[in-house]
Amino acid sequence: MNNNGLLHEIREINLSYLMLAQQMVRENRAEAMLRLGVSHEIAELMATLTSAQLMKLAGSNMLLCRFRFDDHMLLSALTHNVRHEDAAMQTVILLAQQPVEAIQ
């Protein structure tokens, strides 16, 4: 894949992520904040973005979403032989312990 193709794919992912995040925040703000790992202020902002603003943000050449499995304990909990319900609960607990990150 060439550089232009990669940038196009990043922008597509950004737009999908932003649209999903906005929908989540509008439907259930508290749950969205936990699942997305964002602060109340960022959630408020996400809820009010216009389509034009979403498109402008999506146009970035950087991924706007974050891969949250950078914690060894978290990834290990999801990949070891445990029941699905146990893994889901461990994941929620570990993700909730991570600090909320905000765009500065």
Image: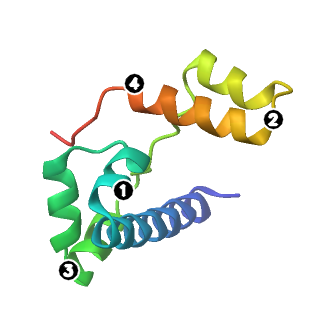
Q: Which mark is nearer the camera, 4 or 3?
A: 4
Question: Closer to the camera, 32 or 69?
Answer: 32
Q: Which mark is residue 97?
A: 4
Q: CA distance from mark 1 to mark 2?
A: 25 Å
Image quadrant where residue 15 sits? bottom left
Horizontal side of residue 74 vs 52, given as left or right: right
Residue under pointer 3 = 50
Residue 16 versus residue 42 in the image, above or below: below
Q: CA distance from mark 4 to mark 1?
A: 15 Å
Is disc 3 surrounded by few (<14), some (14 to 19) or many (20+) residues within 10 Å?
A: few
Is disc 4 surrounded by few (<14), some (14 to 19) or many (20+) residues within 10 Å?
A: few
Residue 51 versus residue 54 in the image, above or below: below
Q: Which mark is nearer the camera, 1 or 3?
A: 1
- Badge 3 element: loop
Q: CA distance from mark 4 to mark 3?
A: 31 Å
Task: Name which of mark 4 and mark 1 comes first in the sequence.
Answer: 1
Q: Which mark is residue 32?
A: 1
Q: Residue furthest right?
A: 81
Q: Amino acid at mark 1?
A: Ala
Q: Which mark is residue 83?
A: 2
- Badge 2 element: loop
Q: Position of residue 46 (x, y in %)?
A: 23, 64
Q: Which mark is nearer the camera, 1 or 2?
A: 2
Task: Name which of mark 3 and mark 2 comes first in the sequence.
Answer: 3
Q: Amino acid at mark 4?
A: Gln
Image quadrant where residue 26 sits? bottom left
